[in-house]
Image (spheres, rainbow, N blue to C red):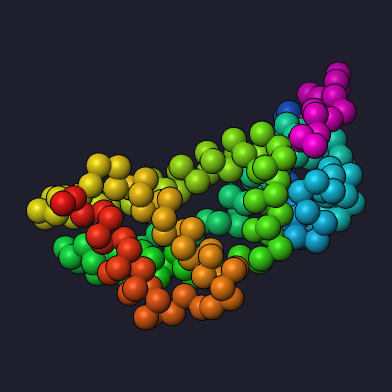
Amino acid sequence: MGSEPGGPQVRGADARSAMGRPRDTGRGLAILEATLSLLSEVGYEQLSMEAVASRSGSAKTTIYRRYRDKAALVAAAVEHRAQATPPEPVSDDLRENLLSLVSWLARQIAEQEIGLLGALFAGMRSDVRLAEEMRRILRRDEAAMTDEPLRKAIRHGEHLAPGAPALFAEIAPAVIVHRIMIAGEPCDGPFVAHLVDDILLPLLRSR
């Protein structure tokens, strides 16, 4: 099933009033939090604008004025939840910076609810619009994570493989998700060092 199509149209005086009235920040946050909560509880397929409206105490028309469809709403909720900033490079050493970055990434993933991650993965398989929105977010986050550490490494003489940022973004999160969700093990210090030393550095450095 795809995203719910555009909802009720607001016309005339109601439309002018809605456009001219500042958005209620508290209500907006309630909508996003309700979306995340329901997504974890019922999954993407069963999530509906009506349920979000009921849980958040908002009118369905209010939600549709802000978000064109269910995919846009879920993407906004994910962006609201994932606002942490990657750490700045801590030194001129690529390994040290990768250890810091991977540790941060592991914490971010570990803090996510498994039910929420599963709902998003399933939703991306069934809804092209959600997949597009999530890939937009992932591409942005990929750039935020890797640009400065890898550029700094190059400035200090590291010879990196072509497409090193994409390699990092493809491998590091996948290994961490597998470790947490499939193996059921923590991403502790020794595991982070293993991921950096035995997997990432050999792949990122050109030969």
Closer-to-camera residue (144/54): 144
Would residue 72 be seen by someone viewing this image from the given angle?
A: no
Res 2 → quadrant: top right
- Per the picture, the main secondary structure of the magenta-coloured stretch is loop
Q: Which residue is drawn at 41% across and 51% down?
A: 169
108 to the left or right of 200: right
Estimate the x, y position of residue 23 in percent, counting from the top left: 71, 41
Residue extent of the magenta highlight:
1-18
Residue 105 vertical position relative to residue 205 in the rendered view, above or below: below
Closer-to-camera residue (4/8): 4
Would residue 70 be seen by someone viewing this image from the given angle?
A: yes
Residue 116 vertical position relative to residue 134 in the rendered view, above or below: below
- Residue 12 in magenta? yes
Q: Which residue is drawn at 49% across and 58% down?
A: 174
77 to the left or right of 64: left
Q: Looking at the rendering, in which quadrant would you find the N terminus? A: top right
Task: Please identify the residue farthest to the top as the structure is shown.
Answer: 12
Task: Please identify the residue farthest to the left as the structure is shown.
Answer: 157
